[in-house]
Image: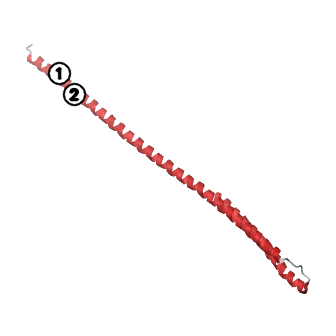
Amino acid sequence: MERQRRKEAETRIIKDLNDRCIALSVELGAHTYGTMGQAGTGGPAVDPDKVLSKFQEEKDRREEVEADLLGKVDEESKVLLEMIETERRVREEATRTMVVMLEKFGERLSSELEQERKDREGTEETILKILEDTASRMETKLKRPY
């Protein structure tokens, strides 16, 4: 969208410059015929200094427009570079945050696995004690005479 607007502005500027050049060419042609007119053709005379001053004015305007456009391009470039830098910083921060989250997740998972292992070992010990107690009671009951 921005590119389209720039293209349209550039087209308008070029058209305006072309129109001005045509006007200056017509005036220069009038000057040429005007000097011939002074020699006897009866055409209007044009002041060469006036034509040169118009060319200078047009050159100055063109340079001003060019400087203005370059300033705008430079300004837009700076804005884009700032946006790129901001995006880079945000991406780096997001990456750091993701790494920290993954490290915390890994630590939590390890601690939960360790806790589960301890719980399983505790349960196994309890079951073994119950089995040993049961076996010992059965031995005692079997050794007793009825």
Percent of width and height locating residue 80: 58, 55
Residue type at mark 1 is Asp
Q: In this view of the protein, can residue 15 be seen by the observer?
A: no
Residue type at mark 2 is Glu
Quarter of the image with the N terminus is bottom right
Q: Quadrant of residue 104?
A: top left
Residue occupying image coordinates x 82% and y 79%? 29
Percent of width and height locating residue 30: 84, 78
- Classify mark 1: helix, strand or loop: helix
Percent of width and height locating residue 2: 65, 57
Q: Quadrant of residue 130?
A: top left
- 64 relative to 140 in the view: left or right: right
How many other residues sit within 10 Å of disc 2, few (<14), some (14-19) or many (≥20)? few
Q: Report the Cα–Cα distance between label 1 and label 2.
A: 12 Å
Q: Which residue is mark 2?
A: 125
- 30 relative to 5 in the view: left or right: right
Percent of width and height locating residue 110: 33, 38
Task: Tell me which label, 1 or 2, sits earlier in the chain.
Answer: 2
* Residue 81 - label: none
Report the label total. Answer: 2
Who is closer to the viewer here, 112 or 131?
112
In this view, the mark in front (1 or 2): 2
Q: Which residue is mark 1?
A: 133
- 109 relative to 85 in the view: left or right: left
Residue occupying image coordinates x 86% and y 82%? 35
Who is closer to the viewer here, 12 or 109?
12
How many other residues sit within 10 Å of disc 1, few (<14), some (14-19) or many (≥20)? few
Who is closer to the viewer here, 16 or 67?
67
